[in-house]
Amino acid sequence: MASRESTSELSKNCQWCYRPFEFRKKWEDVWEQVKFCSDQCRNDSKNKKKILNREQIEAAVMEMTKARSPKSLCPSEVVRQLFEDWRPEMEPARQVCRKLHIEQKIVITQKEVPIKELNFIGPIRIKLKK
């Protein structure tokens, strides 16, 4: 049985939404296997349509940030170009941006300042990492 003190990390990023989440007592024995912050993220990760949309969004984000460099763009510009009904795709676009930020491919900014926490709230802009 792993104790909280012996757990090397007390927080990690969800493998679906890339938001950070904290250790919980109920996960004490299985913390190493916990990959998702919620049941919704685990279920969404199994949805093929959502996976395809995210792949499409990721490719478009990289293409548009390269074309726009060194200026930034809003993730809504990406999803508006890809989807007629774009509003439901905003959260997946933000998730893709978190992933690319972790991979150090892009920089997420708020008010022209790079973010420090991935659980940001409010409007963001993205630009290619220098």
Image (cartoon, helix red, strand yellow):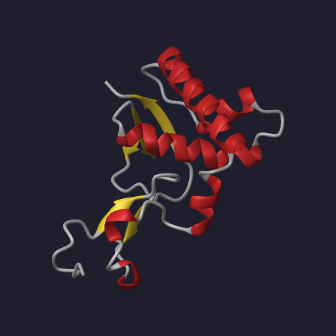
Q: Residue furthest bottom?
A: 25
Q: Residue furthest top?
A: 67
Q: Residue at x 38, y 49 (%)?
A: 115
Determine which quarter of the picture holds residue 32. Answer: bottom left
Which percent across, then down, holds residue 64? 56, 21
Picture layout, residue 70 above or below residue 74: above
Picture layout, residue 66 above or below residue 17: above
Which percent across, then down, holds residue 16? 52, 52
Which percent across, then down, holds residue 70? 42, 21
Picture layout, residue 106 above or below residue 5: above
Q: Residue at x 63, y 40 (%)?
A: 51
Q: Residue at x 41, y 54 (%)?
A: 118
Q: Residue furthest right?
A: 84
Q: Residue furthest left?
A: 6
Which percent across, then down, holds residue 24? 38, 80
Of residue 16 and residue 93, the one placed in the foreground of this image is 16
Determine which quarter of the picture holds residue 4. Answer: bottom left
Of residue 110 and residue 128, the one placed in the foreground of this image is 128
How many discs mark residues in the rendered view? 0
Picture layout, residue 64 above or below residue 25: above
Image quarter hosting the C terminus: top left
Image quarter hosting the N terminus: bottom left
Residue 55 as seen in the image, left or right of residue 79: left
Residue 113 as seen in the image, left or right of residue 72: left
Of residue 89 and residue 56, the one placed in the foreground of this image is 56
